[in-house]
Amino acid sequence: MKALVLEGDVVATVEDYATLAEAHRAGKIFWIELDERSNEAVTFLEKELHIHPLAVEDVWNDLGLPKVEDFGDYVQIILHGLTEVDRASGDVPLELAELDLLIGRNFLVTHARDEKVCAVTPVQLEVVRNPRLLKKGPAWVAHAVMDRMVDEYVPLIDRFDTEIESIEEKILDDERRHIQGDREIIPRILRVKRSLQVLRRTTIYQREILLRLARAEFDEIPRDLVPFYRDVYDHFARVTELVDSYRELVTSLLEAHLSMQSNRLNEVMKRLTIMSTIMLPLSVIAGVYGMNFEHMPELKWVWGYPFALSLMALVALGIIVWFRDKKWF
């Protein structure tokens, strides 16, 4: 646990709940970042801050979807930051890092699974360096955390553009060289599509939460802070639009790749059909002269063998000329 308590014009760091409880009773503004769950932490939240037990459970439980709930004296907000699983790979596998916030009149409680991804650590350093943000109130600190967390979405979202462009170039390159790239391309497309699907499911709910904050539906959000929350909403709405456009682009890319694969397969089947068509009459001729009837006049003819080969060649050449005339080649 790490708490930042406003002491006049400076910020004091507190790491025990007893001192923090005294600061709360004195009406001081503070921000507490929770770590592992403990009986002491639960007692402080329920007894000192009067947080509802269900909200306390949500603080340490990872929920699949963002949410916001007004408890009267405080607002509970659950958002998700974005982290990359493996930067070494070419695709963009993502994981969501949950951020829990409890915004009260004089306190802000946060709990982040990844403090860097959820922008808790950078904002803590900023508050220690300049207490002005904490002086304004807990809602201002919460805004700073959300704003920075939303900004962290953009560089990773932009990587989707690079990855999709790389897949597109790979598809076109394989098409020019007639390389069967299904084993590599389709899994890459599906991984990116799955990441975008997870991201879209989260961003839709998260956008609605930020919209409610921007509409000043909660008393804990001061009126002069509403335009700043509206700005966060606008930035996140752009992220949501990018995710939707990338999903459509990846779907079109998959359809285009499958269409190219189907066209290549059709070309292969066309060539095999042409070869079979050419060989069929030759097989008929060979079958006729392969019969062992005694009274076949060509069997004892000196020029019979060259005649049969010449006949096969003429038939094959005639079929090829006819195919070229029909522009089937």
Image (cartoon, helix red, strand yellow):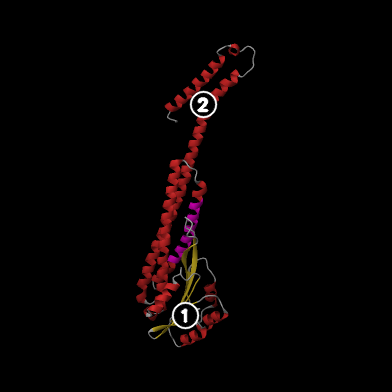
Q: Tell me: residue 277, above or below residue 256.
A: above
Front in this rendered view, residue 282 or 15 = 15
Front residue (pair 53, 273): 273
Q: Which residue is mark 2?
A: 278
Tell me where residue 167 appears, x and y as whole percent.
44, 50
Q: Badge 2 local density, few (<14 within 10 Å), some, or many (20+)?
A: some
Magenta region's main secondary structure?
helix
Residue 242 lies in the magenta-colored region: no
Q: Position of residue 84 (x, y in %)?
A: 48, 62
Q: At x 50% / y 30%, what residue is drawn?
A: 274
Which label was assigned to residue 3?
1
Query: Dot 1, crowdedness within 10 Å: few (<14), some or many (≥20)?
Result: many
Residue numbers of the magenta segment: 187-207
Task: Please give the name of the residue rendered at 49% of the width and 41% of the height, measured from the top-left corner.
Answer: 262
Q: Nearer the viewer, residue 56 or 285?
A: 285
What is the three-letter code of the residue carrying label 1? Ala
Q: Is residue 220 visible from the viewing direction of this image?
A: no
Q: Secondary structure at mark 1?
A: strand
Q: Image height check: is 23 above or below 60? A: below
Please tell me in which quadrant of the rendered image residue 298 appears.
top right
- Circles 2 and 1: CB distance less than 8 Å? no
In the rendered image, the vertical position of residue 151 relative to residue 299, given as above or below: below
Amino acid found under the numbered disc labelled 2: Ile
Q: First in sequence, mark 2 or 1: give its number.
A: 1
Give the x, y percent position of residue 209: 44, 68
Residue appearing at x 49%, y 52% in the figure: 188
SS at circle 2: helix
Q: Position of residue 186 (x, y in %)?
A: 50, 49
